[in-house]
Amino acid sequence: MDLSYTPEETQFRDEVRAFLDEALPQRLSDKVRDGSTLSKAEVEEWQAILSARGWLATHWPREYGGTGWNVVERFIFDVESSRANAPSIIPFGLSMLAPVLIKFGSDAQKERWLPRMLDGEDWWCQGYSEPGAGSDLANVRTTAVRDGDHYVVNGQKTWTTMAQHANMIFCLVRTDSSGKPQEGISFLLVDMTSPGVEVRPIITLDGDHEVNEVFFKDVRVPVENLVGEEGLGWTYAKYLLTYERTTMAGIGASRAALERLREIAQAEQSDGKPLIEDLLFAMRVARADIALKNLETTTMRVVAATAQGGSTGAQSSILKIKGTELRQEISALTRRAVGAYAQPFLPEREGANEAPVGPDYAVAATPTYLNLRKLSIYGGSNEIQKNIMTKAILGL
Amino acid sequence: MDLSYTPEETQFRDEVRAFLDEALPQRLSDKVRDGSTLSKAEVEEWQAILSARGWLATHWPREYGGTGWNVVERFIFDVESSRANAPSIIPFGLSMLAPVLIKFGSDAQKERWLPRMLDGEDWWCQGYSEPGAGSDLANVRTTAVRDGDHYVVNGQKTWTTMAQHANMIFCLVRTDSSGKPQEGISFLLVDMTSPGVEVRPIITLDGDHEVNEVFFKDVRVPVENLVGEEGLGWTYAKYLLTYERTTMAGIGASRAALERLREIAQAEQSDGKPLIEDLLFAMRVARADIALKNLETTTMRVVAATAQGGSTGAQSSILKIKGTELRQEISALTRRAVGAYAQPFLPEREGANEAPVGPDYAVAATPTYLNLRKLSIYGGSNEIQKNIMTKAILGL
Amino acid sequence: MDFTLSEDQQSLVDVLARFSRERYGIAKRTAAAGAESGHDVATWAQLAELGVIGMLFSSEVGGYGGNAFDIMAVFETLGHGLVGEPVLPALLAGTVLAAAGSDALDRLIDGSDIAVSAFYEPTSRYDLDRVATTATEQSQDWKIDGAKAVVHHAEAAQTLIVTAREANGTVSVFAVPAAASGVTMRGYVTNDGIRAAEVKLEGVIVPKAAKLGGVALARDAVDAGTLAICAEALGLMTWLKDATLEYLRTRIQFGKPIGNNQVLQHRMADIVVEMEQARSAVINAAAAMDGPADARALALSAAKYTIGTTATMVAEEAIQMHGGIGMTEELGLSHFAKRALMIDHQFGDSDHHLRRYITLSAA
Amino acid sequence: MDFTLSEDQQSLVDVLARFSRERYGIAKRTAAAGAESGHDVATWAQLAELGVIGMLFSSEVGGYGGNAFDIMAVFETLGHGLVGEPVLPALLAGTVLAAAGSDALDRLIDGSDIAVSAFYEPTSRYDLDRVATTATEQSQDWKIDGAKAVVHHAEAAQTLIVTAREANGTVSVFAVPAAASGVTMRGYVTNDGIRAAEVKLEGVIVPKAAKLGGVALARDAVDAGTLAICAEALGLMTWLKDATLEYLRTRIQFGKPIGNNQVLQHRMADIVVEMEQARSAVINAAAAMDGPADARALALSAAKYTIGTTATMVAEEAIQMHGGIGMTEELGLSHFAKRALMIDHQFGDSDHHLRRYITLSAA
């Protein structure tokens, strides 16, 4: 056994670190560290920097303008980026749609859509979830009816992340209702500027506008925007779900959050000394730290197995469950650390620059905690993950 | 609201305390406190003392020689006895069979069996569980076939507590297999000295001999030993299960164990000071202490509701779950407290008086912890209790 | 032993519950917190009229209640209705005024005035003794300088009850008119939708009589407030539990109510078990309020610790079992959940009180 | 990154696993613990022959393994077979002997001798520095007086490796022949079915050369032992998990396999999640063994803490899910569970190591 990277991997990691050191604007990493919401322009700014370096499409083969990285390199890049508080790459186009297009899309689709992702011309969002469906993704009721060279789409999607910024959405739509729920689903690319598309914000309990409802009323979509074959949309969607998911553990983000927590607990005074010297609090931090170190190695074990061609099926459930629990725990500790100043709420208004109430680091503590409640709900809730594990690992 | 006892209740409590102070032999309470197994003679000694005081049959009406106590008085007596480390009253005859006989038995049965319980002439055990049935008590396969003035019993009971001391057993037996599992069960009293009865010990993981298997091979039981009507045994058994169960919380025993734990943690040295001054350990003790104080009041709330005629149905599940978890937690803390001396095992041999390895208080720490694993398994496992709660409280 | 409400308590509870059900709601609460006054003037007057404020004080000082179980009954009901009005500040300020024999209490009880306590400071965390605000005695008056943190409903108040340190080092409690020169406020809404403010006191001059007494007055007020928000949490948790149960019964997924999932059933059972324990903890605290100081402190810390852990668990579980919809501001659930979570940040969190419990137990 | 076993490791693991499956078992283990020697002489010889002991030591000192992952592989396999032979004592004693350059190690590796460490004392708890045993230097020799607690396999040993305090206060490590005059033992079986003894040393005379070095030798030995029992716990947990899964699949209650209960399914999922975490913790510790002292100490404490909590959880859950039958001595399960529980009482429990982790993190 050997936990260390190969010399090549170490060199790659150093290269990533050097790049982040130089190219990542402090202005952006401060906002990420403090849990502030990034504007559309800020996200695009970072993605343009990555694209210029050729590091935006980490999952793609080189022939399409991707990095061609193997699983270990992707892992290293993800972890280092998160630890450096780099903004997340918006995954919907680059990491979710692109692999489907590359595998199932037509040449014309690849030529049209992939370069626009690299150039930042399109902002994609994902139209899977529907009202009332929850974790039952096959419960698709949005319909697409063929009418000449178009599909006419009617229905509603929900929990659509950052749809307010998007000009394109890829959707699961029902083109046939006669068979089982998983049959008759198609995979369609929809221009959100088309007549009949309406986006309505959903404000989440942290006061943020991150997700939306998207309504389709007689929206006409050219048939060339159908990916693959009609009725096989579920297959394509599932391909994504079984796709490499070691990033689900979120260990880079948790490590960054834990380091920030230590700084906060050093700054906060309790009983006349830094909070971090309070044994009860130190115990909570230590337990999270140990769990995170364990999870870092668990993740690397899965990465190593994947690199050797192993499947990540049930293992990814373990990473998802433990990774989300841990990030939630760290956010709860951060809320606890800031004491009474966990209470004030400062709405973030584009352009406004209100001075914080209490210490800078306290502002986002509660909203971040509240926002991260989503981690155990979305991406297949942690309960669903345990159901999956029951079948896959336990044979029950 | 008022948490305090009435003057009459306070006086009663003082009377119980005074009696325990005077009548409870130190020799016995020391053994209970240290988690040692009491011999048959020791149990009988204490029951004789209680009987002489008229306080042995706490559940019975006065007309049968019972105390006639109300629910609050019984509660007070139970808690005070446990806190004083008095031996438990063996419940099978006095608390489990007797209420059934009083409600469903014939006059002849009452006249014959009840006085013998008070005099200590019979030691009863309970023949409900059968191999492989687990929590499914209606899964009775032991048969009783009528043959003239006798039933002929064949089959096997298991988990029969202290059957090795018993001369009588009350059993659920199957007298009819044609209907649903709950039908065709009868309630039979069997003399264990009858030919064909065999008791085999089950040694539990703590090395103790507390439970047994009891085998019946063509055992002839006079028909006058049938309680109530043939085929209604399940009704009688269920009557017992819905019977007052506030003692299930075991708050007196937990309080005594927690006080003992504090003494141990005061005596044990960690890092040059008493273990109880170690904040991590103190935190565990404090959490148990708070939970116990909460449970004491929860129990009193149920007792008060029962005294006012309320049902204890689902509430008794709450007491059972929380009470057993807490006793197990205290036993785990005690094991933790004694450090490396949790390891030596000294088998208790009747008559033998081996000096302990390590401190006196360490000897029983691990065996007690192991023995108490049973609390969350028997009496309807805690999982079964939650199923019950789901139906009763949650309406699901 | 008697665990039932008195007739007076029961009738107030019934009236108050009905009021908040029929004439109050989250929309009103949210609108009030957004406004500068931070509360709904009409609702406040109605609460006073219903006797809610008077129930918090004994008849000797002009109220018609005032024992610990009265406070418990009122606040549990307020919690169940998610009432955002300044009843908690009134309890704290009023407790100080009552102990000091101030006749300002009358105007509090009848609803004409609002008074709030302002004890904590930007760096005091949960420690009442860590007071940097100074009170300088001058020939005719006191001059007060300092800052107070997260003062609920400060902008609505006529009177601020503040702690300040005198030149000799002792901490005393003063009544400061909110309109006094040198008092400035920065108001905001809290994460749980209540109005609060940072208060600055710069060269604020108050008369000699403004000094109400020593820091013990503040401590007693915080004790009462601690009991109150523990009881409030019971009401919040009951609402959250019932809403979640209803959701489990009615939400269909994969063709069945999600409540058919045994894991959710058992987690609901765990919630019920812990909620009964939490109720017992609050009863224990209420019963200890008039007893010896050490037993009262122990019982209050036990209660606040129990509430802190249980309310957090119930809020998190309620959101989780609701799934995505539980994450939305639109659903009432999120508002109850956030209040239940923020209670752990008032008067000391569960760690603070567990530590205090350990210290007190060892003494 | 490479998380696979080397060929040497894999082949020893395969042979050892097969040996314990086919030629060892709980009956043999229990019988051995009941006998005075406390172990099974034939089994011990076979283990030595298979190379199990040699695998724990490097080729420089006469073994054919000795790196941390060798130790991990051996002990995980021993745990899965619930082997009760004195391999752990051999690791500790041998680590000391190797560091001291003693040629007694050869006889340990080939199985002819048994040596055990005796570092802890009746009141030392888990602290290696709390040594009351004294070593008095005399003109020709050392005189050793004191008592050692819960010394596993002491009665089977030819050599005891003990710590003792010299007159100048420093603690040193000595090799004491078990047969030396003044050495007495009281043997017993432990709750997890291993033979151990309380050892008394009264005026025991050993030659000058018996002093092997300072207390650091004992510390390094305990580090190796800590890694070893953490790995052992992985083997135990795997066995417990598999046995419980099998039970959930095959045990019918209310007409269905009890594994149909979703709550038990999710609890098994939790166990699997935590076991993977525990394995990572042990890998981290093994990887840190040859690194800097502070990183090694941190990783070992993280591992022992993780193992302490996880093994306890797995043992308790395995018993609970088995129900009554899990409580019986007859079932193999209870023996594995007890060993898993007792591991928390060797070399410091989870609290001890969490505390140490906090202290080391702050440094």
Image (cartoon, coloured by chain):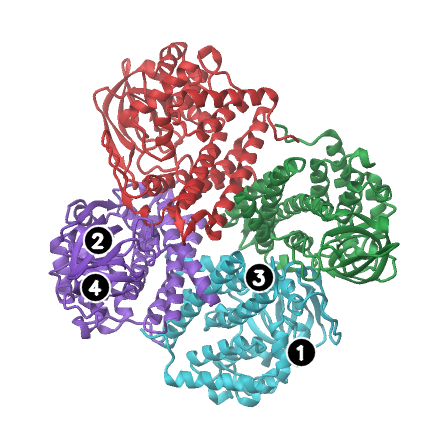
Chain colours: A red, B cyan, C purple, D green
Q: Nearer the viewer, residue C65 or C174?
A: C174
Q: Is residue B366 left or right of residue C93?
A: right
Q: What label does residue C278 carry, if any? A: none
Q: Nearer the viewer, residue A266 or D14?
A: A266
Quadrant of residue B145 within the rendered picture = bottom right
Q: How far from the left and from the top, in percent, is residue D157?
A: 83, 53
| Distance (Cα) linking label 1 and label 3 | 37 Å
| Distance (Cα) linking label 1 and label 4 | 72 Å
The residue tagged 2 is C84
The residue tagged 3 is B275
Q: Residue at x 22, y 32 (%)?
A: A352
Q: Vertical placement of D120 versus A3: above or below? A: below
Is label 3 on the same chain as label 2?
no
| Distance (Cα) linking label 4 and label 3 | 46 Å
Q: Which amino acid type corresponds to the residue marked 4 in the rendered image?
A: Lys
The chain carrying label 2 is C
